Image: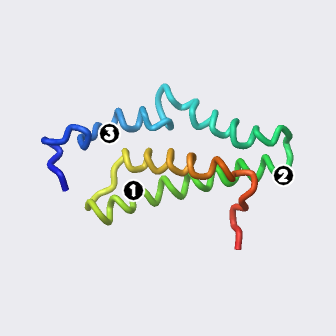
Amino acid sequence: MPDPRQTPWLRQDPDASAQHGALHGRHRHALVGWYGFNAGSAVAADGVAANAFTTTTLATAVASFVWPMMEWIFRGKPSILGFCSGAVAGLVVITPACGLSRPMAR
């Protein structure tokens, strides 16, 4: 693993990571906006919108759990930056198919 003192992009500031992770601080509207985009794309309050809302929530929750766990396995400790990165990655990944995928598909 590269030395964080030699590679400034590996330095982590937990407070800045949490504030800029689109979940806290002045950027908290990003998560609400993502819900509005995913569930609001149904243009109706029906099953498709509820499905989009549910899959968006589950994808964000699972990715924000799995990413720090992978950091824990490979780096020895989880981080707030990993949690925020996982949450944003979960939002990005589910967006194209949020209304069509089922939360607990077999």
Q: Is there CB contact under 8 Å for labels 1 and 3?
A: no
Q: Is there CB contact under 8 Å for labels 1 and 2?
A: no
Lateral position of residue 29 relative to residue 70, left or right: right
Q: Which residue is mark 3?
A: 14
First in residue order: circle 1 vs circle 3:
3
Q: Amino acid at mark 2?
A: Gly
Lateral position of residue 42 relative to residue 85, left or right: right
Kindly identify which numbered label has been placed on residue 47: 2
Lateral position of residue 65 relative to residue 9, left or right: right
Q: Position of residue 25 (x, y in %)?
A: 47, 29
Q: Residue at x 85, y 42 (%)?
A: 45
Q: How are the residues colored?
A: rainbow
Q: Is residue 16 above or below residue 1?
A: above
Within 10 Å of disc 1 (Cα), the crowding (few <14, some 14-19, many 20+) is many
Quarter containing the C terminus = bottom right
Within 10 Å of disc 3 (Cα), the crowding (few <14, some 14-19, many 20+) is few
Q: Which residue is mark 1?
A: 68
Instruction: Assign a secondary structure to mark 2.
Output: helix
Instruction: Assign a secondary structure to mark 3.
Output: helix
First in residue order: circle 3 vs circle 2:
3
Within 10 Å of disc 2 (Cα), the crowding (few <14, some 14-19, many 20+) is few
First in residue order: circle 1 vs circle 2:
2
Q: Going by the picture, which residue comes out furthest to the bottom?
A: 106
The front one of 47 and 25 is: 47
Q: Position of residue 47 (x, y in %)?
A: 84, 52
